Amino acid sequence: MRKAFTLVETIIVILVFGTGILAVLYGMSQTLSNQDRAKTQITSSFLAREGIELMYNLRDSNYRRKLPRNCIFQKSDTATLTLDSQGKEINPFCLSYFTGDTVLKITMGTGGNYLSIQTGTVTENFDTNWENFQLFYATGTENPEFSYRYTGSDSGQPLRYARYILVKTISEGSTTLPADKLLKIESHVLFKKGALTGDTVMESFIGNYEIG
Amino acid sequence: MIKKAFTLAETMIVLVIIGILAVVLTQSYLTISKIAFTIEQEKNLSEEALMLTQMIQSITEDATIDYDKYQGKLADTKGFTDTLYLTGELRSGTTISITGNCLPLEGGFQNEEEDPADLIRENSGCQLILTGPNGIITPLIASNGDNFKRIIISKVLFRVIPFDSEANYFSQELGENKTRVNDVAKPGFRMFLHLYSPFYQPIGQNQIDQPLQLFFNLNAPLPNSLTL
């Protein structure tokens, strides 16, 4: 008489089939996740690059204002100017200066301040950094920008990106280069969508023009 | 000895198992194919975005804003404009603008039932063009129906800073409270653009798109040497 499959054999066969099917499903879910991650990283690399370009603009704009390269310039539309003998603006708009190990939020402003710059603090905690530096998509046809939520406004669609610029001094051995000569800048873009989190970092340097 | 054949129940069980496996494998194959297609489309969009970035970067290296063309209206629009007027030693009379029938900057296309071929046809005239000093038009990026790189572009918006040239700024008369609305700064511009694949992303039925927000510094008279 022919022996039938035992329970153990049946379970083994089911396990083999089940493992195969699970492996396929896991592979599919990983592929989907990687695809989403790749797309997010492409956009975040563009945003990181924009951060670097904005820092170069800040450095060059300060030169044109005859202000120190690391001036954090703040000027309202109705601010009173103080001009030097050549009619150039002088210091009162440098509310502060960034040196080494400074964290900046930099974007294009909504008013007469062409670049909006604020200092911030970075922590080791991703969620805290996310809260502090998240970008929003401004609503309205005239202002379709990825930017920080404007002060006093709750408009804007939250994005899956956050950005901050880290300014660092440079050391050569035990010597630290003067902060007013050369600084390292790192543009960090964090991304977060559901369980998917990560960051993109782009690095560059800003030197200083000699102010004549 | 007569060999015992499979019973009907055994045969049915085998068939059911084979059927289940076939369905799972077919579904897996289809899903993976769709994901691969989506990745290919996204790769196309990112390639186009990178090429556009590099082309505009090379233009900006020897150009600056032609403020005379804006006649002081940039302050009214907070710097937003749909046409970028450039000037400079080699770029005098250069413009970058959009032409043709283009999708809006926001929203993109909404009709998932629409045939991608029709969508391409409807938007095929949409181009971001560079008009040179001699009037020669060069498309920088365009909606196209190439078999391998099907893309659709949205309208393009620029935001220029500062709103006025340095010369105009210092020529303004100061009021009693010494205020000037505008500011001296190095010229630059932000560019907003959306690139779309005409196909819907099969998983989740979303558009396959690549939003672009880029900032470019424009060359302006600055010292040649840095103090290091």
Image (cartoon, grey):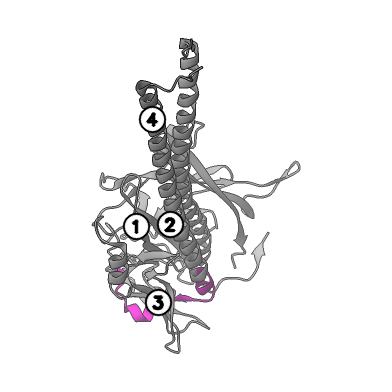
Secondary structure beneath label 3: strand
The residue beneath circle 4 is B15
Image quadrant occupied by the C terminus of chain B: bottom right
Amino acid beneath label 4: Leu
The disc, 4 or 3, on the residue closer to the chain's N-terminal end is 4
Residue at point 27%, 64% (across, down): B104
Q: Are marks 4 and 2 in contact (CB under 8 Å)?
A: no
Depth check, mark 3 against mark 1: the one in front is 1
The residue beneath circle 3 is B129
Do pointers 2 and 3 mark residues of a single chain?
yes
Viewer-nearest residue: A158 or A122: A158
Tell me which corner region of the image, top left, top right, bottom left or bottom right, holds residue B139: bottom left
Amino acid beneath label 3: Ile
- Subunit ID for the residue under disc 2: B
The residue beneath circle 2 is B41
The disc, 2 or 1, on the residue closer to the chain's N-terminal end is 2
Secondary structure beneath label 2: helix
The magenta stretch is: B57-75
